[in-house]
Image (tube, rainbow, N blue to C red):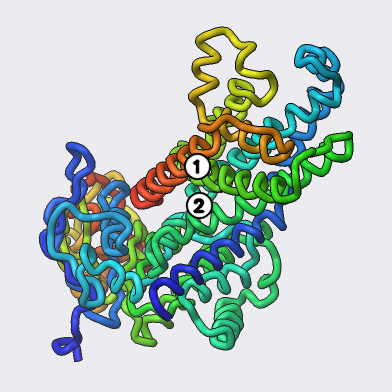
Amino acid sequence: MSSLSFAAADATTMLRRNLKHVQRYPSIPLFVAGTPIVFLLLFVYVLGGTLGSGLGGDRDDYLAYIVPGVLMLTLTGGATGTAISVATDMTEGIVARFRTMAISRGAVLTGHVLGSLIQTMAAMLLVAAVAVLIGFRPTGSPAGWLGALGVLTLIAFSVTWLSVAMGMNAKSIETASNQPMIFLLLPFLGSGFVPTGSMPDVLRWFADIQPFTPFIEAVRGLLMGTPVEAGTMPATFIWCAVLSVGGYAWALWLYNRKSVRA
Amino acid sequence: MASTTPAAITVAGLRKAYGSKQVLDGVDLTVPAGTIFALLGPNGAGKTTIVHILSTLIRADGGEIAVGGFDVGHEAEQVRGRIGLTGQFSAVDALLTGEENLALMGRLRHLPAAELKRRTAELLERFDLVEAARKPLATYSGGMRRRLDLAMTLMGDPEIIFLDEPTTGLDPRSRRTMWEIIQGLAARGVTIFLTTQYLDEADHLADRIAVLDQGRIVAEGTPAELKRLVPGGHIRLTFGDLSALERAAVVLDSDARDDDALTLEVAGDDGVRSLKDVLDRLERASIEVSDLSVQTPNLDDVFLALTGQKDSASQKETVR
């Protein structure tokens, strides 16, 4: 076998390992899907009437408005789960063992990323299904929906790489979920739940430059078939590239130096 | 054979510092292929650091280090293909079963499916884990985990195995089992590099022992050679009364008497022969001995003498 097929085989082995973990301990995927569903129901049924009229519509309009933001919250749960399972791995001697074996660099991390990506996307589909169940009607074309799925996968991929690095950077399993908390805040500090135009100046400035605003706008445009600003799609792709390359480099750097318990 | 055996591990001038702390300060070692080598040292001596450097987990600051004939620095991949490490902390995947852990190792070694299956079954059998094979590791005892850990290392059929404190925390029976497994591996020609705090373990298992203290090798040799480094043993005699003690001191020409405890110590380097000689002389003088013990030096004495840790009462009684 060539080194490339060895690398693919090793990453597949690691992916199987991670999926087996999920299968044995399904609490993380349940948490990943559960939190955004609770947020969705709270926002729609508790706050939706008022916030919907604020947008110049009703509860159903608000539901349609927040679905992209809620899907971003699913990413947060996924990122937290990823960080926790990476941190758990790093505290076990098994990673040190992997590093003394002739396995391809990054296979351990790639396995984590792919495993988490599958979990996050499954959770996202579940959240979307609940949204549809309570009345969400994406008015875009099927091609648009597919596009939204593609963009969501890309975003999940980049956020997952970053959360692998965060999990590795954590000093303990207990603190592993701290850094990914940022992903929980960002959809709120963007256009996830209210238009950024309604925010105070400083907050609006931040909302317009942070990655989750273009992410949410891109997904919203594709799902609903509404026009998006010219800069939204390029900004989404650039942010995804920056986050995944940055996350990958950071994670690999940490992996190569941190997996020995001194 | 000994002189022609190639070295499995050669270390020259190994240095490693963490910040301003010099952990390893010029370590030289040679381990011939197919032998058991024990690295002995107190906590914090740098044993684990050496194992981590030899197993490519961390880089040395300086020195020539070859494992299996390859440089651990720029030929790390070749080294990794030849070694196995069973560390101080169990390197198993606690969320998988024993069988799955072994299969994981086999897949990472790119074994063909049939070979993987065969080896998994063989190792489960050999390490007495057949019954527990499909149970989650949470149900495993410490000894079972350690055996699985070593079985996982063996899945890759390594030439050289590093065992970092392989029996720390195990009960005496599991420890025995582990020793037998280690000896079995060496008998098959595997080179074993083990670290231990237990002197009896090094004495029992190792062909050669190196004593590491404060980042330096302070002694190296066979267990017998090391034991010769400390003063020899002696015979301690206890008498019923002071007059017997006084007469014995004259007969045996010894000043090492304790009048309160009514004991007398006599040098006795060569074991049985000097013991017989002492008893003969006492018998000829009709002196009654109420108690007798032979004190022989053991590795504890060597260890304590070499690592500069002051502690008396470290000599072992072999006869009472």
Q: Residue at 35%, 60% (x, y): give it.
A: B196
Q: Quadrant of the N terminus of chain B?
A: bottom left
Q: In this orientation, which residue lies closer to the viewer: B109 or B140?
A: B109
Residue A69 falls in image quadrant: top right
Q: In this view, does A182 lie above or below B213?
A: above
Q: In this view, does A166 lie to the left or right of B135?
A: left
Label 2: few (<14), some (14–19) or many (≥20) C-alpha neighbours in 10 Å: some
- Residue B26 percent coordinates (x, y): 12, 55
Q: Is mark 2 on a helix, strand or loop?
A: loop
Residue wearing tag 1: A237
Q: In this orientation, which residue lies closer to the viewer: A49 or B54?
A: A49
Looking at this view, name the residue that lies furthest to the right. A134
Residue A92: numbered disc: 2
Q: Is residue B319 above or below residue B19?
A: below
Q: In which quarter of the image is the C terminus of chain B?
A: bottom left
Instruction: State the CA–CA distance, disc 2 to disc 1.
Output: 36 Å
**Count of number-bearing discs:** 2
Q: Do labels 2 and 1 share a chain?
A: yes
Please, what is the three-letter code of the amino acid marked with disc 1?
Answer: Phe
Looking at this view, name the residue that lies furthest to the top. A200
Q: In this view, does A121 lie above or below B127?
A: above
Q: What element carries label 1?
A: helix
Tell us which disc is closer to us: 2 or 1.
1
Q: In this orientation, which residue lies closer to the viewer: B283 or A14?
A: A14
Q: Which of pointers 2 and 1 lies earlier in the amino acid sequence? A: 2
**Chain under disc 2:** A
- Residue A157 percent coordinates (x, y): 55, 48
Please, what is the three-letter code of the amino acid marked with disc 2?
Answer: Glu
